[in-house]
Image: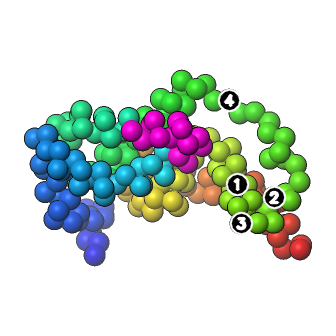
Amino acid sequence: MILMFDKKPYNPESEELIKAIDELKTGSAQAFHVLYSAYNQKVYRFCYRMLGDEATAKDAFQETFIKIFEHRKEFKGTNFQAWLFTIGRHTCLNYIRTKKVHDTFIEDYHSSLSAADSDIGMQEFIQKAIAKLPVSLKEALLLREYEECTYYDIADILGIEVSLAKVRVHRARMIMRKLLKPLVKEIYES
Protein backbone atom coordinates (compact mmCIF):
# COMPACT_ATOMS: atom_id res chain seq x y z
CA MET A 1 0.00 0.00 0.00
CA ILE A 2 1.40 3.39 -0.97
CA LEU A 3 0.24 6.43 0.97
CA MET A 4 0.57 10.02 -0.22
CA PHE A 5 1.99 12.77 1.99
CA ASP A 6 2.86 16.14 0.48
CA LYS A 7 2.61 14.80 -3.08
CA LYS A 8 5.49 12.38 -2.38
CA PRO A 9 4.65 8.69 -2.12
CA TYR A 10 5.49 7.12 1.18
CA ASN A 11 6.22 3.45 0.89
CA PRO A 12 6.60 2.03 4.39
CA GLU A 13 9.45 -0.42 4.84
CA SER A 14 8.69 -3.67 6.59
CA GLU A 15 8.96 -3.52 10.36
CA GLU A 16 12.01 -5.78 10.23
CA LEU A 17 13.81 -3.42 7.84
CA ILE A 18 12.90 -0.32 9.87
CA LYS A 19 14.26 -1.99 12.99
CA ALA A 20 17.42 -3.06 11.12
CA ILE A 21 17.97 0.49 9.82
CA ASP A 22 17.75 1.86 13.36
CA GLU A 23 20.04 -0.86 14.76
CA LEU A 24 22.58 -0.41 11.96
CA LYS A 25 23.47 3.00 13.36
CA THR A 26 24.74 1.28 16.52
CA GLY A 27 26.96 -1.05 14.47
CA SER A 28 24.82 -4.17 14.70
CA ALA A 29 26.21 -6.89 12.44
CA GLN A 30 22.81 -8.64 12.47
CA ALA A 31 21.08 -5.47 11.26
CA PHE A 32 23.66 -5.09 8.50
CA HIS A 33 23.04 -8.70 7.46
CA VAL A 34 19.27 -8.10 7.29
CA LEU A 35 19.73 -5.00 5.13
CA TYR A 36 22.35 -6.71 2.97
CA SER A 37 19.97 -9.64 2.39
CA ALA A 38 17.14 -7.27 1.48
CA TYR A 39 19.08 -5.09 -0.99
CA ASN A 40 22.14 -6.98 -2.28
CA GLN A 41 20.60 -8.21 -5.53
CA LYS A 42 19.20 -4.81 -6.48
CA VAL A 43 22.49 -3.04 -5.78
CA TYR A 44 24.53 -5.62 -7.68
CA ARG A 45 22.21 -5.43 -10.72
CA PHE A 46 22.46 -1.65 -10.68
CA CYS A 47 26.28 -1.72 -10.46
CA TYR A 48 26.53 -4.34 -13.20
CA ARG A 49 24.29 -2.41 -15.57
CA MET A 50 26.05 0.87 -14.83
CA LEU A 51 29.54 -0.54 -15.35
CA GLY A 52 28.88 -3.34 -17.85
CA ASP A 53 31.72 -5.48 -16.48
CA GLU A 54 31.18 -8.26 -13.96
CA ALA A 55 34.50 -7.93 -12.12
CA THR A 56 34.23 -4.14 -11.80
CA ALA A 57 30.57 -4.43 -10.79
CA LYS A 58 31.47 -6.87 -8.01
CA ASP A 59 34.12 -4.45 -6.74
CA ALA A 60 31.71 -1.51 -6.83
CA PHE A 61 28.99 -3.58 -5.17
CA GLN A 62 31.31 -4.64 -2.36
CA GLU A 63 32.63 -1.11 -1.91
CA THR A 64 29.05 0.20 -1.71
CA PHE A 65 28.19 -2.04 1.23
CA ILE A 66 31.49 -1.26 2.95
CA LYS A 67 30.65 2.44 2.65
CA ILE A 68 27.15 1.79 3.99
CA PHE A 69 28.60 0.24 7.12
CA GLU A 70 31.36 2.83 7.51
CA HIS A 71 28.94 5.76 7.11
CA ARG A 72 25.97 4.19 8.89
CA LYS A 73 25.72 7.01 11.44
CA GLU A 74 25.34 9.57 8.64
CA PHE A 75 21.98 8.17 7.49
CA LYS A 76 19.37 10.58 8.78
CA GLY A 77 16.68 10.30 6.13
CA THR A 78 13.56 8.26 5.84
CA ASN A 79 14.35 6.43 2.60
CA PHE A 80 17.16 3.93 3.19
CA GLN A 81 16.89 2.50 -0.33
CA ALA A 82 17.46 5.93 -1.88
CA TRP A 83 20.49 6.49 0.38
CA LEU A 84 21.85 3.06 -0.52
CA PHE A 85 21.44 3.63 -4.28
CA THR A 86 22.98 7.10 -3.96
CA ILE A 87 26.10 5.58 -2.45
CA GLY A 88 26.07 2.84 -5.11
CA ARG A 89 25.70 5.47 -7.83
CA HIS A 90 28.61 7.54 -6.55
CA THR A 91 30.75 4.41 -6.30
CA CYS A 92 29.95 3.46 -9.90
CA LEU A 93 30.63 7.00 -11.11
CA ASN A 94 34.02 6.89 -9.40
CA TYR A 95 34.81 3.63 -11.20
CA ILE A 96 33.72 5.16 -14.50
CA ARG A 97 35.91 8.23 -13.89
CA THR A 98 38.97 6.18 -12.98
CA LYS A 99 38.48 3.89 -15.94
CA LYS A 100 38.16 6.97 -18.19
CA VAL A 101 35.51 5.40 -20.35
CA HIS A 102 35.27 7.09 -23.72
CA ASP A 103 32.62 6.58 -26.33
CA THR A 104 34.15 4.49 -29.05
CA PHE A 105 32.80 3.14 -32.24
CA ILE A 106 32.02 -0.50 -31.63
CA GLU A 107 32.13 -2.28 -34.97
CA ASP A 108 30.01 -5.27 -33.95
CA TYR A 109 27.33 -2.93 -32.53
CA HIS A 110 26.87 -1.30 -35.92
CA SER A 111 27.16 -4.50 -37.93
CA SER A 112 24.58 -7.10 -38.80
CA LEU A 113 21.97 -7.94 -36.20
CA SER A 114 22.21 -11.68 -36.74
CA ALA A 115 22.81 -12.14 -33.02
CA ALA A 116 19.28 -10.84 -32.44
CA ASP A 117 17.95 -14.20 -33.60
CA SER A 118 18.11 -15.51 -30.05
CA ASP A 119 17.01 -14.12 -26.71
CA ILE A 120 20.63 -13.98 -25.58
CA GLY A 121 21.60 -12.02 -28.66
CA MET A 122 18.71 -9.66 -28.10
CA GLN A 123 19.71 -9.12 -24.47
CA GLU A 124 23.29 -8.40 -25.54
CA PHE A 125 22.07 -5.92 -28.13
CA ILE A 126 19.90 -4.16 -25.54
CA GLN A 127 22.81 -4.07 -23.06
CA LYS A 128 25.06 -2.54 -25.72
CA ALA A 129 22.41 0.07 -26.44
CA ILE A 130 22.09 0.90 -22.72
CA ALA A 131 25.88 1.21 -22.50
CA LYS A 132 25.77 3.85 -25.25
CA LEU A 133 23.53 6.14 -23.16
CA PRO A 134 25.11 9.09 -21.36
CA VAL A 135 25.65 8.23 -17.69
CA SER A 136 22.97 10.64 -16.44
CA LEU A 137 20.34 9.05 -18.67
CA LYS A 138 21.58 5.49 -18.15
CA GLU A 139 21.33 5.66 -14.36
CA ALA A 140 17.83 7.16 -14.49
CA LEU A 141 16.65 4.49 -16.95
CA LEU A 142 18.21 1.63 -14.95
CA LEU A 143 16.63 2.82 -11.72
CA ARG A 144 13.20 3.18 -13.34
CA GLU A 145 13.04 0.15 -15.62
CA TYR A 146 15.19 -2.44 -13.85
CA GLU A 147 15.01 -1.46 -10.19
CA GLU A 148 11.41 -0.21 -10.44
CA CYS A 149 12.14 2.97 -8.47
CA THR A 150 9.54 5.71 -8.46
CA TYR A 151 10.39 9.06 -10.00
CA TYR A 152 10.56 10.44 -6.45
CA ASP A 153 13.13 7.80 -5.47
CA ILE A 154 15.12 8.48 -8.64
CA ALA A 155 15.13 12.18 -7.80
CA ASP A 156 16.34 11.41 -4.26
CA ILE A 157 19.04 9.03 -5.46
CA LEU A 158 20.34 11.35 -8.18
CA GLY A 159 19.90 14.52 -6.16
CA ILE A 160 17.69 16.17 -8.76
CA GLU A 161 14.12 17.45 -9.03
CA VAL A 162 11.33 14.97 -9.81
CA SER A 163 10.58 16.73 -13.10
CA LEU A 164 14.21 16.29 -14.20
CA ALA A 165 14.06 12.61 -13.25
CA LYS A 166 11.04 12.21 -15.53
CA VAL A 167 12.81 14.08 -18.34
CA ARG A 168 15.92 11.91 -18.06
CA VAL A 169 13.91 8.68 -18.17
CA HIS A 170 11.93 9.98 -21.15
CA ARG A 171 15.08 11.02 -23.04
CA ALA A 172 16.72 7.69 -22.31
CA ARG A 173 13.68 5.85 -23.65
CA MET A 174 13.70 7.99 -26.81
CA ILE A 175 17.38 7.24 -27.45
CA MET A 176 16.80 3.55 -26.78
CA ARG A 177 14.00 3.52 -29.36
CA LYS A 178 16.39 4.95 -31.94
CA LEU A 179 19.18 2.54 -31.03
CA LEU A 180 16.88 -0.47 -31.04
CA LYS A 181 15.06 0.47 -34.24
CA PRO A 182 17.24 -1.84 -36.42
CA LEU A 183 16.53 -4.74 -34.07
CA VAL A 184 12.80 -4.14 -34.13
CA LYS A 185 12.88 -3.82 -37.92
CA GLU A 186 14.73 -7.12 -38.29
CA ILE A 187 12.35 -8.93 -35.94
CA TYR A 188 9.25 -7.73 -37.78
CA GLU A 189 10.71 -8.39 -41.24
CA SER A 190 11.47 -12.03 -40.47
Query: Where is mark 2, residue-wise?
Result: 115
Query: Where is mark 1, residue-wise?
Result: 124
The amino acid pointed to by label 2 is Ala
Residue occupying the point 21% across, 66% down: 14
Give whichever of discs 2 and 1 has the lower sequence position: 2
Residue occupying the point 68% across, 29% down: 102
Give whichever of discs 1 and 3 has the lower sequence position: 3
Q: Nearer the viewer, residue 161 or 19?
A: 19
The amino acid pointed to by label 1 is Glu
Mark 2 to mark 1 CA distance (whole Å):
8 Å
The amino acid pointed to by label 3 is Asp
Tell me if label 1 and label 4 are in contact, CB under 8 Å. no
The residue range painted magenta reads 48-62
Tell me the element at label 3: helix
Tell me if label 4 and label 3 are in contact, CB under 8 Å. no
Res. 137 in view: no
Mark 4 to mark 3 CA distance (whole Å):
28 Å
Name the front one of labels 4 and 3: 3
Query: Where is mark 3, residue-wise?
Result: 119
Mark 2 to mark 3 CA distance (whole Å):
9 Å
Q: Quadrant of the C terminus?
A: bottom right
Whole-percent x, y for residue 24 in the image: 16, 45
Q: Nearer the viewer, residue 185 or 155?
A: 185
Tell me if label 2 and label 3 are in contact, CB under 8 Å. no
Badge 2 density bin: few <14, some 14–19, many ≥20, Cα 10 Å: some
Residue 102: which disc? 4
Tell me the element at label 4: loop
When the figure is inspected, residue 79 is found, relative to residue 87, above or below; the finding is below
Mark 1 to mark 4 CA distance (whole Å):
20 Å
